[in-house]
C-alpha cells in the first residue's frame, strides 16, 4: 500500500496544498478549524512526515545558538570545544552553531544577549546559566517568539525551557556522598563544601543529593555550609583559608563545581596537600592531572562529547517539532579514579 502524501491530506481535508504546508510547518494565518481538519486527516491517513526530505527540498539550514558563561572555568571551555566539534560534524546535516559568551554572574547581560537574537535567523538556543528571575523572563520571551530553548549541563526547571540535556545532578551528588563517606571511613569529622554559585541548579541539586546520603549512611560526618567562590580564585583562597582555621576536624572537601586549580594551589601553600579526601565533578585538564597525581580522590563526570551532540540533536528535533529519542539522549554518570582515567 502506497504511503499517504500531502496531496492525499489536502484531498481528505478539503483544503489546498499551500494550507497543508502551512499547518505542517506551524506557520500562522490558518484558522483553528482548518488546522483541526488537517490534523484529523493526517491521523486518519496515518501520514508520517519525512522531515529530512522536506528540509533537503527546502534547503533548510539549522541556525543554532549556545550561550555559555565567560568564567574562565576549564569545564566550560572544555564544553565549548565539544560543542564546536559537534557542530563541525553536524555541518553535513545543514547545522550551524554560534557560541556566544556572556559575563558570568551578570544575568542582565545574558538577557540582553538573548533579546537581541533575530527570530528569523535563530532555530534554537542552548543555555548554561543560573536560574534567576531575569533569565526566566528572557527564556519566556524567546519561547513567545517561537524559538526553542534547552538547558545544558545545569537545568532550568522553573523556566519555560523545552528540554534539559545533562546528567541527573541530584544522583551525581548522591554518588559523591557515597564516595566521600566510604573514602573517609568511620569516625567523626567535618566535610567542607565549595561551589561557584548556589544559584546554579546543578550545584543546588548536587548538594541536596550529597547531604541526603551523608545524613542517612554516614551520620558521623558533618557537612559544613557551602562556601561560594563566584568563580574567583582569590575568593576561594580566602574562604578556604578562613574555614580551615576553625574547622579543626576537617576530613574531606567536596567541590560541587569549578575551583579545583585554586583549591590545589591553596592547600599546597598551606602545606595541606594530601591531608583531605577530595571529591569533585567534571573531567578537565586540571582534574585529570590531579587524579593522576593523587591530589583528587574521585571525579564524577559525564561525556561532554555526548552532551554536545545531544544538545544539537534535541534542538533540531524541537525546531522540527519532532519527537526526541530519550534513550539516545540520556547521559550516564561516570566515576573516575586514578586507576581508570580514559586516554585523552
Image: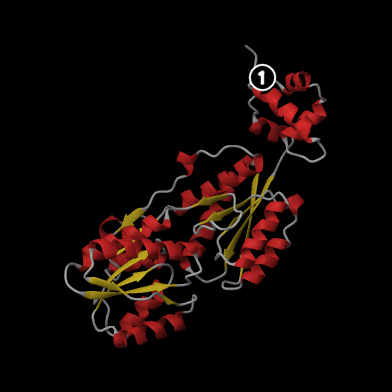
Taking the spot 28% from the left edge, 55% from the top edge, the residue there is: 340
- Whether 175 is drawn above or below 27: the answer is below
**Depth check: 268 or 210 in front?**
210
Where in the figure is residue 152, as x and y percent of width and height?
53, 55
Q: Say whether residue 200 is left or right of residue 23.
A: left
In depth, the one of 180 and 74 nearer the eye is 180
The quarter in which the N terminus is drawn is top right
Query: Against 26, is 246 above or below?
Result: below
Count how many numbered circles sit on residues in the image: 1
Query: Between residues 60 and 186, which one lies in front from this camera angle?
Result: 186
Residue at 29% x, 65% y is 292
Quadrant in the picture for residue 56: top right
Vertical comparison of 284 with 268: above or below: above
Q: Residue at x 64, y 29 (%)?
A: 50
Q: Is residue 75 visible?
A: yes
Q: Quadrant of residue 234?
A: bottom left
Q: Would you say 314 lies left or right of 140 here?
A: left
The location of residue 158, given as percent across then percent down, is: 56, 58
Q: Residue furthest front?
A: 33
Mark 1 highlights which residue?
Answer: 45
Callout 1: SS: helix
Any part of residue 342 in sight: no
The extreme left residue here reads: 186
Residue 166 pos. (x, y %) = 47, 53
Quadrant of the drawing holding the C terminus: bottom left
Asked if residue 239 lies left or right of residue 338, the reply is right
Amino acid at each position: 500500500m502506497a504511503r499517504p502524501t500531502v496531496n492525499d491530506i489536502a484531498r481528505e481535508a478539503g483544503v489546498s496544498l499551500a494550507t497543508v504546508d502551512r499547518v505542517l510547518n506551524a506557520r500562522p494565518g490558518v484558522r483553528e478549524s482548518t488546522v483541526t481538519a488537517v490534523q484529523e486527516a493526517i491521523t486518519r491517513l496515518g501520514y508520517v512526515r519525512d522531515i529530512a526530505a522536506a528540509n533537503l527540498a527546502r534547503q533548510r539550514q539549522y541556525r543554532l545558538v549556545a550561550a555559555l558563561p565567560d568564567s574562565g572555568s576549564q569545564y566550560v571551555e572544555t564544553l565549548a570545544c565539544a560543542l564546536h566539534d559537534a557542530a563541525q560534524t553536524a555541518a553535513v546535516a545543514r547545522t550551524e552553531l554560534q557560541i556566544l559568551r556572556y559575563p558570568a554572574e551578570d544575568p542582565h547581560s545574558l538577557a540582553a544577549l538573548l533579546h537581541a537574537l533575530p527570530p528569523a535567523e535563530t532555530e534554537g538556543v542552548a543555555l548554561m546559566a543560573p536560574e534567576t528571575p531575569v533569565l526566566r523572563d528572557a527564556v519566556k520571551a524567546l519561547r513567545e517568539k517561537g524559538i526553542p530553548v534547552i538547558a545544558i549541563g545545569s537545568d532550568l526547571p522553573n523556566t519555560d525551557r523545552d528540554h534539559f540535556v545533562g546528567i541527573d545532578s541530584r544522583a551525581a551528588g548522591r554518588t559523591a556522598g557515597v564516595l566521600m563517606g566510604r573514602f573517609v571511613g568511620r569516625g567523626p569529622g567535618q566535610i567542607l563544601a565549595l561551589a561557584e554559585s548556589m544559584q546554579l541548579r546543578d550545584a543546588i541539586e548536587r548538594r541536596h543529593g550529597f547531604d541526603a546520603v551523608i545524613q542517612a549512611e554516614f551520620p558521623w560526618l558533618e557537612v559544613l555550609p557551602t562556601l561560594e567562590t563566584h568563580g574567583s580564585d582569590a575568593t576561594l583562597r580566602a574562604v578556604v583559608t578562613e574555614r580551615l582555621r576553625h574547622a579543626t576536624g576537617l576530613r574531606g572537601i567536596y567541590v560541587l563545581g569549578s575551583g579545583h586549580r585554586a583549591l590545589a594551589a591553596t592547600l599546597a601553600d598551606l602545606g595541606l596537600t594530601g591531608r583531605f579526601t577530595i571529591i569533585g565533578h567534571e573531567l578537565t585538564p586540571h582534574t585529570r592531572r590531579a587524579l593522576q597525581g593523587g591530589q583528587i580522590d574521585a571525579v564524577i563526570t559525564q561525556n561532554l562529547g555526548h552532551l554536545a551532540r545531544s544538545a544539537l540533536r534535541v534542538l533540531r528535533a524541537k525546531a522540527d517539532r519532532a519527537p526526541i529519542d530519550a534513550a539516545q539522549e540520556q547521559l550516564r554518570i561516570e566515576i573516575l579514579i586514578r586507576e581508570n582515567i580514559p586516554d585523552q
